[in-house]
Amino acid sequence: MKKICFGLSTLILICVMACNTPTKIGTTTSLPQLGKSSLKEVIKAMTLDEKANLVIGMGFFVPGLPAEMFPPIAEADKTTPEKVVGAAGRTHAIPRLGIPSLTVSDGPAGVRIDAIRNNDNSKTYYATAFPIGTALASTWDTALVKELGVAFGSEVRDYGIDVLLGPAMNIHRNSLGGRNFEYYSEDPLVSGRMAAAIVNGVQSNGVGTSIKHFAANNNEFNRMSMNVQVSERALREIYLKNFQIALQNSNPWTIMSSYNLINGTYTSQSKELLNTVLRQEWGFKGMVMTDWFAGKNAVEQMVAGNDLLMPGNLTQKDAIVAAVNNKTLPLSTLDENVERILNLILKSPTFLGFKYSNKPDLQKNAAISRKVAADAMILLKNEATLPLATGKKVAVFGNTSYNMIAGGTGSGDVHKAYMISLNQGLENAKYTVDAALTTTYKAYSIAEKAKQPKPRTPFDPIVAIPEMPIDAALAAKMATDNEVAIITIGKNSGEFADRTLDIDFNLTAAETAMINAVSQAFRAKGKKVIAVLNIGGVIETATWRDKVDAILLSWQTGLETGNAVADVLSGAVNPSAKLATTFPINYKDEASSKNFPGKELATNDNKPASMIESKPSEITYEEGIYIGYRYFNTFNVKTAYPFGFGLSYTNFSYGDVKLSATNFKDKITATITITNTGKVAGKEVVELYLRAPDRKLFKPDMELKAFGKTNILKPNESQTMTFTLTANDLASFNTATSSWMAEVGTYTVKIGASSADIKKTATFTLDKDLELEKVNKVLVPKVQITEIRK
């Protein structure tokens, strides 16, 4: 054997070369592997380039659109096949360390993916369109909403998706908010509990959710650069409170930061918001991701604790790598971001090797959607009209009756297999729908749609065709030939634009003329007129509601809307939903109407706004804590339909409120017995409001602190509802001390059927001021905000 000798310097050189020779991608020998090695070992083995890749997504590229519309992404990312075609985004894989790519998908009312792949119509990937968020909140039934969440999550799982980008849960600050349909309520308690119910349902399938948009994302106007100037108290009590409640009642895998700035800082770049409040004060352990293209500075986002930048681009990656190299971004900070992403990956179905089917049970889920849709519909008016006996001859008016709106546009839309229109639903329920009128509407719709220009991009808004004119002669003939009229008013909205006052909030001239013509013709013959509101946001009703005999607010309740409307109209389902957002008489009656949607700021930049970049703008929340019913009740402003309102086909009586004590210690329990005093079975939403003393801090007249829904009660059947109030329920935020405080004095418990229909009250006292929790002095406005006071 030939003897080989090495000098010391040669041995050192060989060792150095061995230590620095990169392992080929895909080679796993001696390398740490995710799930088998500790996270510290895996992170230590990652190169800086790999870490920077992991904290940005794989980019956003739409075939057929100019590349210059979007920030630059790697060519390899463009050509890497999507696991789920049409999903919203992906993360980078690092195969040599056993790290797979995850898939995230919109949206809040159903899985948003492409229904057809590669032009192959032999296989379809449809998803269930579920009721919109505002409709879900109208059920006031967290158990039912969780049941829907379980069905929703099963489709996320079965289509191979890891994280659902939802639920969306921002506050209804103003009726014209373009994405209000995705959101739940004007009240943080309703918003928080509904979001938690969806999260718990979806995640029971072993997939994740991303509650969004954190926080104060309350309009679409210049959303990419809108600076929200808001007081610490309004933030804590309204715009952050709903997220806090959701986290207290669920454990979402991720949270999505919003587009806007809060008091001068982008939310995705706000360490005060994402680390101090979210992680330190609230104890959130999960991952934070940006909304798509949100924020301006990738390095500041990393420092703030915004772990994943979506959809990701090369400019962000280069900035992160450069910042680590020049020591402006500590490697330890980047490692924390990476670790939180790896923790998410570890529990994902992709990492765990789940064999997804691409075949969710769409029939079963459609039945659940229909069931929830019927429970989400609100009876606003009923003058001896409903329920409507089946078999009647019905004239159905309104374009939307024949083309109902399942949900809003943008990321909240769903590619569904079908949509049940109102005329179909009525026919399925054994009503006789006037065939001649149906033919007229369908012909009109085809002709008008042919006139519309084709959308240039997937992001172009869908423009509704004009309402078909109804002249007196046609209305008179329909009144002669039919027993009852049903008029559908349809209004849609979505991402990228807020609603307008003249078209979306108020009725158009054509809609008003239709109601007038139909009402006059049918009432002249002593026949009833029913209005169905297939809408995603609040509309004006005061000027026309006396012209109809019944109003059913159907919202946008998914692919089975037509069947569900018929279920309620016929009495197969007794309506039990109630408003989770107020209907004002006039738009100007809203406190926020004075400054919505904000204003653009003067700049020297003449660059036009785009889908991913808007003009610097600002809005000041001058109404402070007085949002929705908090404002209307406190300042005695009349409403068309108050928060919490909804009728039934039966009646309920409320017994006396019984408190467990008259003096508050650690908690107090309120009980009340609800009895069905009518003739048909039904469910009642019971709402508990609290009026607090205001010696030191100004307060709303009352605030919702608890709610519940009875079981289906038969005639003369009763159920006792129990609610527990803790010290936190008594507290308001004291800006001067940065603490939550309950004031000494008398508290009034108000239990009723709406915020304006309090049935019973009781009082208890608190003997001394309680400072419950002192928090950090953060998110302070940089300008003086003059808020309204009572």
Image (cartoon, rainbow, N blue to C red):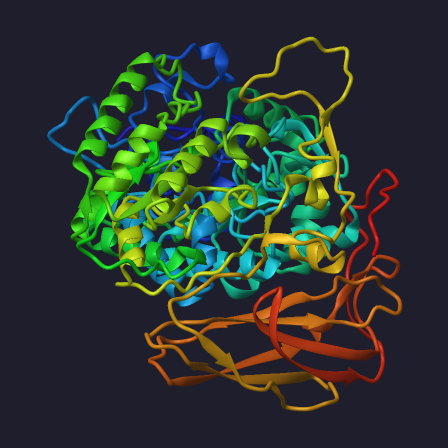
User: Which image quarter: residue 238?
Assistant: bottom right
- Which quadrant is home to the N terminus? top left
User: Which image quarter: residue 374?
Assistant: bottom left
Residue 683 visible in image: yes
Residue 162 visible in image: no
**Farthest-out residue, left:** 122
Q: Position of residue 765 (x, y in %)?
A: 78, 84
x 74%, y 53%: residue: 625
x 30%, y 63%: residue: 573
**Farthest-out residue, bottom:** 661
Foreground pick, 390 / 779: 390
Left or right of 170 on screen, residue 150: left
x 36%, y 47%: residue: 529
Q: Position of residue 290 (x, y in %)?
A: 55, 37
Foreground pick, 781 / 601: 601
Q: Position of residue 252 (x, y in %)?
A: 48, 55
x 31%, y 44%: residue: 485
User: Which image quarter: residue 398?
Assistant: top left
Number of numbered labels in the structure image: 0
Foreground pick, 431 / 503: 431
- Which quadrant is home to the C terminus? bottom right
